[in-house]
Image (tube, rainbow, N blue to C red):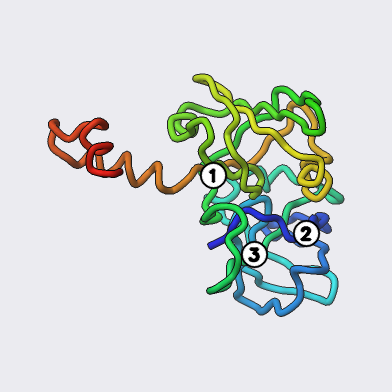
Amino acid sequence: MFTGIVSEVGNVVSLQSGKLTVGAALVLKGLELGGSIAVNGACLTVTEFTPTSFTVDLSPETLRRTNLGILKTGHSVNLERPLGLGGELGGHLVQGHIDGTGRIIAISPQGGSTIFRFEAPLEIMRYLVEKGFVAVEGISLTVAGRTASYFEVSIIEYTRTHTNLAAHKIGDQVNLEVDIMAKYVEQYLSSQKPDITLEFLKEQGF
């Protein structure tokens, strides 16, 4: 489990034969073989590491669901170690299970922040609500607005300069993970009798 608070921006050293090696520093402290690490929001298992890098295996499912397969040497990636028991939950609960990818379609400065607009498929948009949570490239963000086909987030300068969003441009593909609570609510509703409505759930405190 993660929080969506990026610990460090690493750099791709190599990607070949389903193995991704990333150069890093902070996230290597206390790292063990078999441990988990989030790379652009995807929870992966460390199979090798050195004093300056770590290696993870990319399964066909990971390559299908994420943007990791299109990374090139030198690309920036967001890194986060798992949340420890009793640790500070600065963002929201992020599983590291990427639901799919979206695409940056607009980047607009606004005051001291930057508005990023992401186009996303219907199977992801259905779970997004204004002021709800979404993880983009493993970053815990708040949905500032949405339509049927895209959503927007407001990024403060600190977040942009301390994540790989600083290197992203219009047209780039990004990893997306929706709030798991939205999926639970949907499944609960679909398994209930027809008389269980959204209004009924609100009355019951959901």
Res. 177 mark:
1
Residue at disc 1, secondary structure: strand
Q: Which quadrant of the view contains residue 32? A: bottom right
Residue 152 shown left or right of residue 8 in the figure = left
Return the disc, 2 or 1, that comes first in the chain's sequence. 2
Residue at disc 3, secondary structure: strand
Outermost residue toward the top?
148
In depth, the one of 42 and 160 nearer the eye is 160
What quarter of the picture does the C terminus occupy? Answer: top left
Label 3: which residue? 37
In depth, the one of 73 and 166 nearer the eye is 166
Q: Position of residue 172 (x, y in %)?
A: 73, 32
Label 2: which residue? 8
Amino acid type, mark 3: Ile
Q: Position of residue 92 (x, y in %)?
A: 55, 52
Return the disc, 2 or 3, that comes first in the chain's sequence. 2
Q: Residues within 10 Å of mark 3 (few under 14, many from 20)?
A: many
- The residues tagged by marks 3 and 1 sit, at their Cα atoms, a distance apart of 16 Å
